Image (cartoon, rainbow, N blue to C red):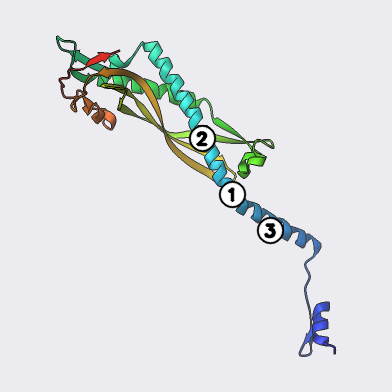
């Protein structure tokens, strides 16, 4: 049994009523163009779904490490240049027995240091873009391909400046000992360029300024130094009476 209509369709020619219809075939250049478009779309989808999260994670780690190293270097250079330490920012007053009578923050000196630090860090960032080199094999997220292939270079630039916040932390160190550390939290906003567009990255870097070890009890009023973490405009904290001792 034969089916003329189906055979005609398979051959590309068939009739509807009295009219002959021919199935149109794409020319070779059009087929190649369609194949290239499909392949490009598949690559874009692969990059968005698999590679982009890997690129973001690698860029975030590389850029934050680079900025942390730069901020730390500028901080220690400034501390050494000005010969500053913990006692230059935190003013301790002692009683006749050697205990801490009161503690206050030298906010003027702290603000001057913050301004100088921000200026030096931003000047260093203006003169150089941060270039991240990532092995192409690492972008696949497969351990076997880690480190393989040439490096993909990604450029990042810090924008919107840098914001510095005073940081104060008390931690227990052994029996009846408390470590008090002061420093800055530097907030950065960076942008890096990817084939899909510009990506935004925000993160903080903690930079220590100094620390001391308090032997004895730390009263609650002394720990109110932490109130300056968010607002650095306060000139002096409340006086505190403490029977502990400071070991520099």
Q: Secondary structure at mark 2?
A: helix
Residue 146, compared with residue 236, is above or below; it is: below
Q: Quadrant of residue 228?
A: top left
Q: Quadrant of residue 218?
A: top left
* Horizontal and vertical percent position of residue 8: 82, 82
* Residue depicted at x 28% and y 32%: 230
Q: How many marks?
A: 3
* Horizontal and vertical percent position of residue 1: 85, 90
Q: Are marks 1 and 3 in contact (CB under 8 Å)?
A: no
Residue 245, compared with residue 48, is above or below; it is: above
Mark 2, residue position = 61
Mark 3, residue position = 38
Mark 1 or mark 3, earlier in chain: 3
Mark 2 or mark 1, earlier in chain: 1
Left or right position of 6 against 70: right
Inter-mark Cα distance, 2 to 1? 18 Å
Q: Nearer the viewer, mark 1 or mark 3?
A: 1
* Residue depicted at x 48% and y 41%: 200
Mark 1, residue position = 50
């Amino acid at each position: 049994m034969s089916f003329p209509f189906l055979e005609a369709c398979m051959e590309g020619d068939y009739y509807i009523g009295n009219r002959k219809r021919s199935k149109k075939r794409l020319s070779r250049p059009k087929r190649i163009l369609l194949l290239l478009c499909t392949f490009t779309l598949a690559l874009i989808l692969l990059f968005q779904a698999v590679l982009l999260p890997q690129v973001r994670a690698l860029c975030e780690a590389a850029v934050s490490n680079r900025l942390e190293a730069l901020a730390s270097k500028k901080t220690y250079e400034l501390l050494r240049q000005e010969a500053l330490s913990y006692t230059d920012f935190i003013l301790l007053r002692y009683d006749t027995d050697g205990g801490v009578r009161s503690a206050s923050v030298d906010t003027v000196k702290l603000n001057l240091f913050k301004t100088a630090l921000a200026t030096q860090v931003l000047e260093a960032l203006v003169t150089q873009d941060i270039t991240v080199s990532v092995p192409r094999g690492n972008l696949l997220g497969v351990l076997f391909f880690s480190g393989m292939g040439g490096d993909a270079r990604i450029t990042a630039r810090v924008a919107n400046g840098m914001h510095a916040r005073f940081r104060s932390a008390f931690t227990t160190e052994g029996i009846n000992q408390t470590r008090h550390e002061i420093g800055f939290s530097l907030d950065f906003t960076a942008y890096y360029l990817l084939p899909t567009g510009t990506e935004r990255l925000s993160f903080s870097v903690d930079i220590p300024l100094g620390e001391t070890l308090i032997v004895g009890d730390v009263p609650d009023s002394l720990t109110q130094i932490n109130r300056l973490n968010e607002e650095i405009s306060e000139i002096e904290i409340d006086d505190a009476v403490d029977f502990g001792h400071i070991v520099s």
